[in-house]
Amino acid sequence: MKLVLASNNAKKLAELRTILSGAGVSLLSAREAGFTDEIDETGTSFAENACIKAQTVCRATGLPAVGDDSGLCVDALGGAPGVYSARYTGSHDDSDEARYRLLLKNLEGETARAARFVCAVCCAMPDGTLLTASGACEGEILTAPRGTGGFGYDPVFRPLGFDRSMAELSAEEKNAISHRGRALAQFQRELENYCHAHK
């Protein structure tokens, strides 16, 4: 099955291709499918934003489209940055490092550093069906960045049960425990059920 990822984030595309590799899915970026518009993420939750992205790209391309919205929720900051994780500094154009440096600054002196990565996935089918899934990865925010792998807030997030940051894990380790890995495993089951029912 051909699916369009409602994103042009190269790292996200590579991660999703790896995780969905066994599902018989061919994943295109939005640009590869001919979609180049900006999508307004006006939702107040990860799930709403994922569905906005998926439905917009599905309508424009006529192909099944997968939207993913994910972010970091920090208890001591009342759940922030949350749905604003990618624009925490005020701009999508700022670097990942600028965003996690601001996060560390906002947590200075804070000892309660529990946090979780959350991911919502929505797949919009041309027949109007929506397949949804979600996943979370619990952990805590470190006091300084560690590691060079991954992207986003990975260098400052230590998953529960690990003595390394998300950016210090191998791709296999990360995909096995990450919020996106968990959401996509659930999505893969939903997709298989949908395909089976629509044979």
Image (cartoon, helix red, strand yellow):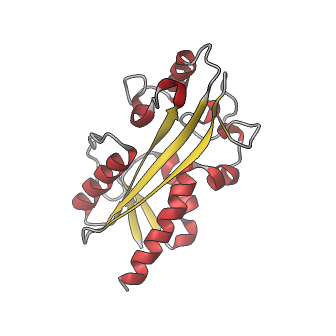
Q: Nearer the viewer, residue 63 or 41?
A: 41
Q: Position of residue 194 (x, y in %)?
A: 39, 76
At x 57%, y 55%, the residue is 181
At x 27%, y 57%, the residue is 55
In the image, is residue 9 above or below residue 198? above
At x 43%, y 51%, the residue is 120
Which part of the image, by quadrant, shows the C terminus? bottom left
Q: Would residue 22 be found to the left or right of residue 60 on screen?
A: right
In the image, is residue 194 above or below residue 199? above
Q: Where is residue 76 in the image (x, y as percent from the top left)?
A: 53, 25
Q: Would residue 147 be found to the left or right of residue 38 on screen?
A: right
At x 37%, y 26%, the residue is 91
Q: Which residue is the extreme one toward the bottom?
A: 199
Q: Would residue 28 be found to the left or right of residue 99 on screen?
A: left
Q: Where is residue 31 in the image (x, y as percent from the top left)?
A: 35, 52
- The number of discs equals 0
Q: Nearer the viewer, residue 76 or 172?
A: 76
Q: Where is residue 29 in the image (x, y as percent from the top left)?
A: 40, 55
